[in-house]
């Protein structure tokens, strides 16, 4: 016969007590526990414990027995009085290795030992109170021991007390997992990570040493109180129960030391004691990391606010810089305009007969105006340097003549003071170098001028040698040393000598004057040119200023420009040259007219932009002087409208005469179609050099036109003409001198992209009758073509613009018929010249 025995501690499961005496029960280790611990175990499958007590009152319920038959777990009914199995489902027959229910009923499983009988009696008493029991048992189907975890519950069978037995897990299913869980808990007890074992209802049943240290013992507060946010705690437990695992997340916890941050995760396991679902929580203290992260976030937020504030400050600085530039431009204009009158009239008076003593006074007036102009130029130069808008004009130039030109204007001052002014050139120097001769002259004139100013006796010497004589300098570097025997500079002053508005001594400033910007400008110019400047001095003995600049040797570039004294070319037919001066300031008109009258030119005035446009359209002038700022129309707009007429007005020289002396102003004037640029105050030599060049070019162009057998035909794709007809070479050369090859190459590349697109848009606008759109495109093309010297393209687009302004759509379409091929051939002429 078969029997069952509670599993005994310290003895292997399956030891039969006596093969024939199956009623001998030995108490197992899983003795009766508290009601909570012995409650039903939740399961993922249906079981008898899922039904209420009312359903279990009578186990003879056919519907209930039908359900039990369908379950896969072994289930049977044991009668207390009979000591037999009264009913069993198919799984139980397999468990007991029985062929049929009738055969199984014949077996007696009544316990024989006193301990086993006492256990069964305890079961009966517990069942009377409505308790269910969990216990590990060893069964002996056919005398072969099987260990199983069972669920026991009291029922009624045919009016007699009985118990329903359900085998939940057999050895190898639950027993081994229980052992693994127990070993896992014991292993984790000493790890430094907080480990807590929680039942499904949130009851804390076990924890490791790290948890004791962090939260206190099990008796010190409940599990739920350990979390600051209940919602986060419940979400963690729910996710672990439903999904089997809840990934770690940072939660706020209440520790013995106060609130902290732990990285908490959970995994679904079974309670090693009851096999009930439980949760194994693990937590790592990340408070320090969290504080670092919060500090980092605060730092990032501060940096974000700082970046925002810096952006606002940058925008404000840009606006302030723009306002400063506008202010300087305005002040330059307002100062240069009267200065033009002072210098011009003074020079005009000095050229004529003067009474004794008047020449000295007029010279003092001129010198004072020159000094004031130097201050204005220094301020403007320093402003451009600080704004990064100063551009260099790198080109080959003759080194010796340039240095002679630096000293010659200063030589009268040296002679007046009884000083020797010398130039010493190293014989190994290259005759031609590449650089910006204008900025080199500016630096050297400042250094030599200072040396003369602060030297009462002795000499001033300019020495130039290769840079290889100085350590750390390359073969292309040149050294310029200005040596004097003057008052010298104190050692404590030398470090701040090149700072702006810094001078050696206030008393010296009062004696010698100066703005304190000259040396600061020299230093910044030297840095922009890729060099540096330094000073050495011994008080009472003199000073040495050393300028080092990279000026590589270069090939000679054409003959030098004609000297200022060269006479102007004669006008055709022996008539005087006719000049229009468009200037709203009476003194400036007088100065310019006086200078031009001295060379026999015939002058006509226009006092505002409207008069200038009218006289330019109706007169026959050989040259026009155009002020940029005038009432009504400004000089730029007047120039654009005159150029738009084409013909002679497209070729007449228009010279900008303006107090706007910035490089940007020069570029704007040239882009509007002006031929040359003269800043105020107008100097005699610069004026007549410009007039001579423009009139000579005009004469050459007139000769070309007179020698042509037929008038020039309209531009067409089939007869594009030679490059000289497409591209005004003299204008191109002048533009190259003014802007530099690199700028023109960049402009050409940009025009190669934009011109075909604009020509296509112009044609499309004419096709759909959009006269205003066509006029806008023609105006833009004309302006760029005039700037780049594309004469035929400029003339054709000017005709199109004029026809659209009338408006005459038919005539505009006639002029635009061959525009796209003309654009292509014009771009080809540019590409051939600049190799792009």
Image (cartoon, helix red, strand yellow):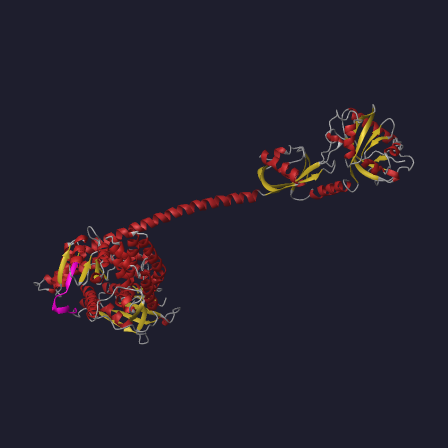
* Residue 803 percent coordinates (x, y): 25, 55
Measuring 91% from the left and 34% from the top, which residue is drawn there? 21
**Residue farthest to the top, as pictured:** 159
Q: Quadrant of the N terminus?
A: top right
Picture quadrant where residue 781 is located: bottom left
Highlighted magenta segment, given as a residue range = 568-581
Front residue of this view, candidates 810 and 429: 810
Q: Quadrant of the C terminus?
A: bottom left
* Residue 337 percent coordinates (x, y): 19, 55
**Does the segment drawn in magenta span residue 343?**
no
> Number of numbered discs present?
0
Indicate left or right for 80 with 439 as reference: right
Indicate left or right for 292 with 238 as reference: left
Picture quadrant where residue 150 is located: top right
* Residue 56 percent coordinates (x, y): 77, 26
Front residue of this view, candidates 1 and 91: 91
The answer to whether residue 249 of the structure is visible from this angle is: yes
Measuring 48% from the left and 45% from the top, which residue is drawn there? 299
Indicate left or right for 547 with 687 as reference: right
Front residue of this view, candidates 325 and 530: 325
């Amino acid at each position: 016969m078969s029997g069952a025995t509670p599993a005994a501690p310290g003895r292997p499961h399956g030891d039969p007590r006596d093969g024939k005496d199956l009623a001998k029960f030995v108490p197992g280790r899983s003795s009766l526990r508290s009601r909570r611990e012995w409650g039903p175990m939740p399961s993922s499958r249906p079981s008898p414990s899922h039904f209420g007590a009312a359903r279990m009152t009578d186990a003879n319920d056919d519907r209930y027995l039908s359900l039990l038959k369908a379950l896969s777990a072994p289930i049977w009914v044991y009668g207390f009085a009979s000591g037999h199995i009264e009913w069993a489902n198919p799984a139980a027959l397999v468990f007991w290795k029985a062929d049929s229910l009738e055969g199984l009923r014949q077996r007696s499983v009544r316990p024989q030992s006193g301990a086993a009988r006492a256990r069964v009696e305890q079961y009966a008493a517990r069942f009377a109170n409505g308790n269910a029991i969990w216990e590990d048992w060893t069964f002996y189907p056919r005398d072969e021991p099987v260990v199983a975890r069972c669920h026991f519950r009291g029922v009624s069978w045919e009016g007699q007390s009985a118990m329903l037995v359900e085998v939940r897990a057999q050895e190898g299913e639950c027993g081994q997992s229980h052992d693994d869980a127990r070993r896992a808990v014991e292993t984790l007890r000493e790890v430094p990570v907080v480990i807590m074992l929680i039942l499904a209802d949130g009851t804390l049943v076990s924890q490791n040493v790290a948890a004791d240290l962090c939260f206190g013992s099990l008796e010190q507060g409940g599990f739920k109180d350990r979390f600051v946010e209940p919602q986060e705690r419940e979400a963690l437990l729910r996710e672990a129960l439903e999904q089997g695992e809840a990934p770690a997340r940072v939660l706020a916890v209440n520790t013995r030391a106060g609130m902290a941050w732990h990285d908490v995760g959970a995994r679904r396991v079974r309670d090693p004691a009851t096999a009930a679902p439980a949760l194994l929580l693990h937590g790592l203290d990340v408070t320090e990391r969290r504080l670092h992260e919060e500090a980092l976030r605060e730092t990032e937020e501060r940096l974000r606010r700082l970046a925002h504030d810096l952006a606002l400050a940058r925008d404000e600085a840009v606006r302030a810089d723009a306002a400063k530039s506008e202010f300087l431009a305005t002040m330059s204009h307002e100062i240069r305009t009267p200065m033009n009158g002072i210098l011009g009239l003074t020079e005009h008076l000095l050229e004529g007969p003067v009474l004794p003593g008047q020449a000295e006074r007029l010279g003092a007036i001129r010198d004072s105006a020159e000094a004031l102009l130097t201050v204005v130029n220094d301020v403007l130069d320093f402003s451009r340097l600080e704004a990064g808008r100063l551009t260099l004009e790198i080109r080959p130039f003759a080194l010796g003549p340039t240095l002679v030109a630096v000293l010659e204007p200063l030589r009268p001052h040296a002679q007046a003071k009884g000083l020797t002014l010398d130039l010493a050139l190293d014989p190994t120097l290259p005759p031609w170098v590449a650089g910006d001769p204008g900025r080199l002259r500016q630096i050297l004139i400042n250094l030599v001028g200072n040396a003369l100013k602060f030297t009462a006796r002795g000499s001033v010497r300019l020495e130039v040698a290769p840079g290889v004589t100085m350590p750390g300098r390359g073969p292309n570097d040149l050294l310029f040393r200005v040596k004097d025997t003057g008052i010298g500079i104190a050692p404590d002053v030398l470090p701040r000598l090149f700072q702006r508005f810094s001078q050696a001594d206030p008393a010296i400033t009062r004696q010698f004057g100066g703005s304190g910007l000259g040396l600061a400008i020299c230093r910044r110019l030297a840095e922009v040119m890729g060099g540096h400047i330094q000073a050495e001095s011994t008080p009472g003995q003199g000073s040495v200023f050393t300028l080092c600049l990279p000026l590589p040797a270069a090939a000679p570039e054409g003959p030098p420009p004609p000297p200022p004294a060269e006479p102007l070319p004669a006008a055709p037919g022996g008539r005087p040259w006719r000049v229009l001066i468009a200037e709203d300031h009476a003194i400036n008109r007088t100065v310019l007219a006086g200078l031009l009258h001295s060379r026999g030119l015939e002058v006509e005035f226009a006092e505002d932009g409207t008069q200038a446009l009218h006289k330019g359209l109706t007169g026959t002038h050989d040259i026009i002087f155009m002020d940029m700022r005038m009432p009504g129309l400004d000089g730029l707009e007047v120039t654009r409208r005159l150029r738009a007429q084409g013909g002679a007005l497209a070729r007449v020289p228009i010279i900008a005469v303006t107090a706007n002396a910035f490089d940007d102003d020069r570029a704007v004037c040239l882009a509007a179609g002006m031929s040359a640029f003269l800043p105020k105050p107008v100097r005699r030599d610069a004026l007549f050099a410009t007039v001579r060049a423009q009139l000579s070019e005009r004469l050459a162009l007139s000769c070309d036109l007179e020698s042509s057998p037929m008038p020039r035909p309209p531009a067409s794709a089939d007869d594009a003409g030679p490059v000289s007809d497409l591209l005004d070479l003299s204008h191109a050369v002048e533009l190259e001198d003014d802007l530099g090859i690199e700028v023109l190459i960049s402009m050409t590349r940009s025009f190669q992209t934009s011109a075909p697109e604009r020509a296509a848009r112009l044609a499309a606008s004419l096709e759909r009758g959009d006269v205003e759109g066509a006029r806008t495109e023609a105006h833009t093309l004309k302006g760029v073509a005039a700037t780049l010297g594309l004469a035929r393209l400029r003339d054709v687009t000017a005709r199109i613009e004029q026809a659209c302004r009338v408006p005459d759509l038919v005539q505009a379409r006639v002029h635009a018929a061959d525009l796209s091929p003309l654009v292509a051939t014009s771009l080809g002429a540019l590409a051939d010249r600049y190799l792009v």
